[in-house]
Structure formats: structure tokens, C-alpha cells
Amino acid sequence: MKTITLYSTQTGNTKKVAETVFKINPFEKAIIPIDQLESQVSLDDYDLILIGYWVENSQANGEALSMMEQLRNKQVILFGTSGTDPNHSYVRKVRKAAESALDSSNELLGHFVCQGEISEAVITGFEALVNMQPENKTMANLLRVFKEQYPISIGHPNEEDLRNAERYFRDIFSIIGSGQ
């Protein structure tokens, strides 16, 4: 089986997860940041596509989302990082939106999300947006969540997060390798 891990990263959080997954991938493999994917690399040559994203504006970031939307007839595993707890309702909505971006011809084999560190710039940016749009309750609510999660997010993804990624992907790779 030929696999490729594609990822987008802004602060390095998603890159850490991508490299962890790549390291334990037992199949023929390649790893490329999405922004360095050259036109001469054909995704048709790969059986399994792993796509890593970071959360931007309550969804997978645009670059990764665009990659998800163009895939057809592939086995896909998604993974992402979010500044908020991966069990938070906010992240469940992000996961659902990312999965919905995949064409129905694809087979989604898994979706892993772990906490990443929230950048102070994100909070500053949301504060500015809330000040410009005080009537926007959704924006104000997101700012509240980010401020609440910021201290918890520091240092993520940490070793435990990366071990969780290893366990998750080892299980999936094992199932794929056994042909189930």
C-alpha cells in the first residue's frame, strides 16, 4: 500500500502530529506539507491519503479543506489540531465539517484530533473582531472559549497527545494491514 501524509501547519502543532504518524506508518510512505505539494506529484499514485489540518474560523484551515474537497475515490484519514480540548463541542462541529468536505466517493477510515497550543495572536485577533462586531454573539462566544482554553492549551501537542496519536494510528494501520 502506498501512502502519503499531507499536512498544513501554522504554528507547528499539526506538523508534530504529521511527523509522529509518518514515523510509525508501516507502509510505503511520503510526507509533504500541502503548500509544497508540487503538481508533478499525482495523488492518483497513492492508495491512502492522510490529511492534517489546523482549525481556522471554526473549520479545517482553507488549504487543507481545499485538498479534502478535491479528493475522489480514495481511502482517507484526517487528523487535526485545535487549541481547544478535542472533546469540546466546538471541536465536534469542526470534525463534522471536515468530514463533510470529503466527496462521498472517498472512504473515511479515521479522524484524529488533538489539542494544539492556542496562539496569543488568535486571542488578540478575536478580541479585535468582537470589538468591531459587538452584536456578533458567535464571535464573542468563541473568544470566551479561546480565553478559557488558552492556559490549558499551553505546551500542546505534548508527549501524551503524540502517544495518543501513535496508538490511534497504529490501530488503524493494523486493521488496514490485515485487510479488514
Image (spheres, rainbow, N blue to C red):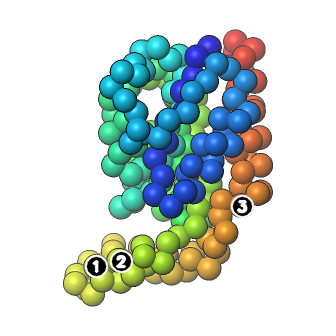
Q: Relative to residue 45, is residue 3 drawn left or right?
A: right
Vertical placement of 109 versus 140: above or below? Answer: above
Q: Which of 176 and 19 is in front in this view?
A: 19
Vertical placement of 132 versus 156: above or below? Answer: below
Check disc 3 and give the amino acid type: Asn
Q: In the image, which disc is placed on residue 129?
A: 1
Q: Which residue in the protein does label 2 denote?
A: 126
- Separation of residues labelled 3 and 1 (CA atoms): 30 Å
| Residue 167 image position (x, y, % from top left) | 77, 40
Q: Which residue is drawn at 66% across and 38% down?
A: 21
Helix, strand or loop under label 1: helix
The picture quadrant where one finds residue 175 is top right
Q: Can residue 24 be seen in this view?
A: yes
Vertical placement of 144 versus 109: above or below? Answer: below
Q: Which residue is drawn at 74% across and 41% down?
A: 166
Vertical placement of 98 versus 68: above or below? Answer: below
| Residue 137 image position (x, y, % from top left) | 31, 78
Q: In the image, which disc is placed on residue 158?
A: 3
- Indicate which disc, 3 or 2, sits on the residue closer to the N terminus: 2
Check disc 2 and give the amino acid type: Phe
Q: Which of 180 and 161 is in front in this view?
A: 161
Q: Relative to residue 168, is residue 141 drawn left or right?
A: left
Q: Nearer the viewer, residue 94 or 14?
A: 14
- Indicate which disc, 3 or 1, sits on the residue closer to the N terminus: 1
Q: Are marks 2 and 1 in contact (CB under 8 Å)?
A: yes
